[in-house]
Image: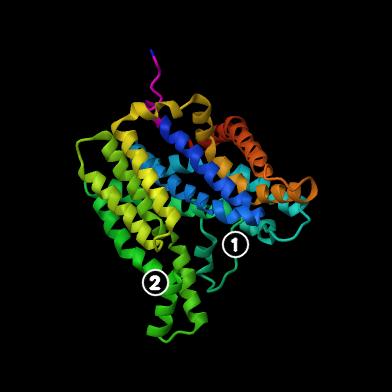
Amino acid sequence: MEKNYTTEKKGRVNVLDVLRVVAVVMVILSHYYLNYPDVGEKVAWGALGVQLFFIISGFVIYSSLENTKNYRDFIVKRFLRLSPAMLICSTIIFVFFRFFYTGEGYANSKLFSNYLIANTFIDPTFINVFFGRVRYYYLDGAFWSLWVEICFYTLIGLLYFINKKKFINYYVIICFTLTPIFMLFYTSTGQNVLQTTFSLTAEQAYLFKIYGRALAFFDNCFWFLIGIFLYLLYNDKTKKKYIYYIIFLFLINIVKDKFYFPLIIFSMIAFAFFMVFVYASQKVEFIAQPLLCKIGVASYSMYLIHYYLGMVVVKYLKENVADSYIWPFLVMVVVILFGLFSYNYLEKPLGKLYKKVFKV
């Protein structure tokens, strides 16, 4: 019998693991080709892979909530999933830049305080709020999305276990209430409004921008909601209303980003694919090959390790070996191999140790 790769196996939907591969490749190449100015702008849209990760998270986390007894267990499960890879990757990044890297830049990656903050998953800006100025930074620029994920887990889990029937309604209300506040505090338009309406100086308005950065989750909260409605539609294909909700949320994100053309194309392709995934899953079975699924499962550590470290390697190869467009691809392959090795031989053993410590 031909294997159906779209079906769930051990709580996983394999097609989503392949989409993780797509997402991480998009992000990695969009970063690495920044070393090539003539190409970098043309592939900058690859950064939208992060939004694809957020949609997948919305889908997967709803499933996880339904299979978790209480809020504590849910948070512990999330921590056990995220922490081992973060500890491993942040340690490698910190050690490399602190003790081996002698080039320019990346000073923030050499600070032990930033290393410690990275392993709390807290946005350094959230800590900076208490100082009224920028004092701490990300150890690696890719880590910003982890704070967004943590905010989502914390909020959606709390709302779910407060009221399992109305938690989505509560989530929607909170998002539509706080997203405008984020935009007022953080965006350039919002900063101008603050300065003109409240007669604030640029420095005073910038303090609100720090507050706004701590609310970065609300710049991305609707992407998770797309994943939530996609999960509901996946499990009940007769509820056509979820299709309209998903379309509406894509439109909201497009309007928020001022009709950024690559985002419009991304949204159209993503929506079309997800509709096929839900209503004609047999047509996407071919993408869920075992190797791709394995890479997708290990994609988290690939994302964590790829950015600053990989950028340095690509730049070195380009400047000292040969000015070739092939380096981003080759370094990406190394990152993928590292992710597979780390997941199977580092993260799993460390995860087992964590479980003993937390008695899970």
* Residue 7 counted in the magenta span: yes
Q: Residue 193's x, y, as percent? A: 39, 79
Q: Name the residue under label 2.
A: 184
Residue at image point 32% right, 55% down: 251
The residue at the far front in this view is 38
Of 142 and 126, nearer the camera is 142
Can the viewer see residue 258 in this picture? yes
Q: Residue 51's x, y, as percent? A: 44, 50
Cα separation between marks 1 and 2: 23 Å
Residue at image point 42% right, 35% down: 16
Q: Residue 356's x, y, as percent? A: 52, 34
Q: Would residue 13 appear left or right of 136 to someone viewing this image?
A: left
Magenta stretch, residue numbers? 2-13
Q: Residue 352's x, y, as percent? A: 54, 32
Q: Quadrant of residue 55?
A: top left
Callout 2: few (<14), some (14-19), or many (20+) C-alpha neighbours within 10 Å? some
The residue at the far top in this view is 1
Q: Would residue 179 appear left or right of 212 to someone viewing this image?
A: left
* Residue 318 counted in the magenta span: no
Name the element at disc 1.
Answer: loop
Q: What's under tag 1, amino acid-wise?
A: Tyr
Query: Dividing the image into 4 quarters, which one contains the N terminus?
Result: top left
Tell which tag, 1 or 2, sits nearer the viewer.
2
Q: Would residue 294 appear left or right of 98 to someone viewing this image?
A: left
Can the viewer see residue 153 in this picture? no
Query: Dividing the image into 4 quarters, which one contains the C terminus?
Result: top left
- Which label is found at residue 137? 1
Q: What's under tag 2, amino acid-wise?
A: Leu
